[in-house]
């Protein structure tokens, strides 16, 4: 398989139902690394999933509802269970990997009461790889999964102090819904809901 630019990966995800394992290079033939790629979370890459999730919680403590203190106590069976939940009908998860080191993660779960809506969770890109398009690639991967499942709305929550993430989500097609929720870890913070519609796949989208 050849190397793809971030924009090419986004185009591929826009047209594929099962995106997986695409290597990456940045324009002008400058290869950043032969191996950066995204791959689905599954029961075979639980150690990478655990590593990246704990890094995310430690790096961005006010971005998530859960905490490093809580999840660092999970045993291996709990990580296996969570990976399984992100790799089948119950949900989807992707990690971005560079030279076998994970540097990004995203998950999504269909709403239990509304199969045409899914909630994005756990969005995180390591500081070393930010502002290079990888967060957007991970969102695109979830959007492609959603299209394939005929999910019509993607939702997420973002904390009121997380201005960078709000702008990132706006740039990726999300808008505030007006709903707010209490943030469990700090009463001075609230969570805003953002959402976007997922267009149905059509033949017109094909190359
Ligand atoms: C938010 C986050 C996932 C973005 O990942 P990323 O890989 O840097 O995002 P991208 O490179 O795809 O950004 C796409 C565009 O979004 C916008 N954007 C991204 N991060 C931004 C920031 N911190 N401030 C303002 N705009 C931002 C920019 O318009 C950017 O395009 P540009 O770099 O050409 O200007 C990453 O900063 C992160 O992991 N933050 C900490 C965890 C977090 O807040 N997660 C969200 C939980 S709800």
Image: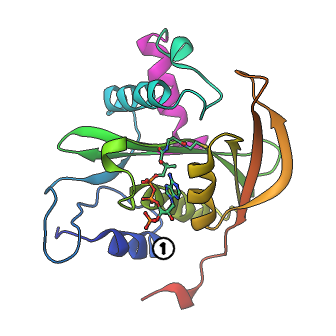
Q: Is mark 1 within 8 Å of ligand 1?
A: no
Tell me how many marks there are: 1
Residue 190 position, x and y percent, is: 78, 35
**Image side of residue 25 versus residue 134, left or right:** left
**Image side of residue 85 versus residue 40, left or right:** right
Which color mode does the image show?
rainbow
**Nearer to the camera, 104 or 13:** 104
Q: Is residue 184 magenta?
A: no
**Image side of residue 1 versus residue 43, left or right:** left
Residue 72 position, x and y percent, is: 46, 13
- In the rendered image, the quadrant that contains the N terminus is bottom left
Residue 174 position, x and y percent, is: 67, 62
**Nearer to the camera, 94 or 115:** 94
Residue 198 position, x and y percent, is: 67, 68
- In the rendered image, the quadrant that contains the C terminus is bottom left
Q: Which residue is mark 1?
A: 14
**Image side of residue 91 versus residue 18, left or right:** right
Residue 169, relative to residue 183: is it above or below? below
Q: Mark 1: which secondary structure?
A: helix
Residue at image position (55%, 26%) is: 61
The part of the chain drawn in magenta is 74-93
**Nearer to the camera, 198 or 171:** 171
Residue 90, relative to residue 34: is it above or below? above
**Residue 102, quarter of the rendered image:** top left
């Amino acid at each position: 398989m050849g190397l793809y630019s971030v924009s090419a990966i986004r185009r591929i995800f826009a047209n594929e139902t099962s995106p997986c394992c695409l290597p990456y290079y940045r324009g002008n033939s400058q290869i950043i690394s032969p191996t950066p790629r995204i791959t689905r979370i599954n029961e075979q890459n639980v150690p990478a999933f655990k590593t990246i999730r704990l890094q995310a919680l430690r790096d961005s403590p006010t971005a998530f509802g859960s905490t490093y203190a809580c999840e660092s106590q999970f045993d291996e069976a709990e990580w296996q269970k969570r990976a399984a939940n992100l790799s089948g009908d119950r949900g989807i998860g992707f990690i971005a990997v560079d030279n076998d080191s994970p540097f990004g993660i995203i998950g999504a779960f269909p709403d239990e009461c509304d199969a045409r809506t899914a909630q994005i969770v756990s969005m995180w890109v390591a500081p070393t790889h930010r502002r290079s398009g990888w967060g957007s690639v991970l969102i695109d991967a979830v959007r492609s999964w959603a299209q394939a499942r005929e999910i019509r709305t993607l939702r997420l929550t973002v904390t009121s102090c997380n201005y960078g993430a709000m702008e990132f989500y706006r740039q990726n097609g999300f808008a505030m819904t007006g709903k707010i929720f209490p943030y469990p870890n700090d009463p001075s913070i609230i969570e805003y809901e953002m959402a976007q519609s997922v267009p149905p796949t059509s033949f017109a989208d094909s190359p």
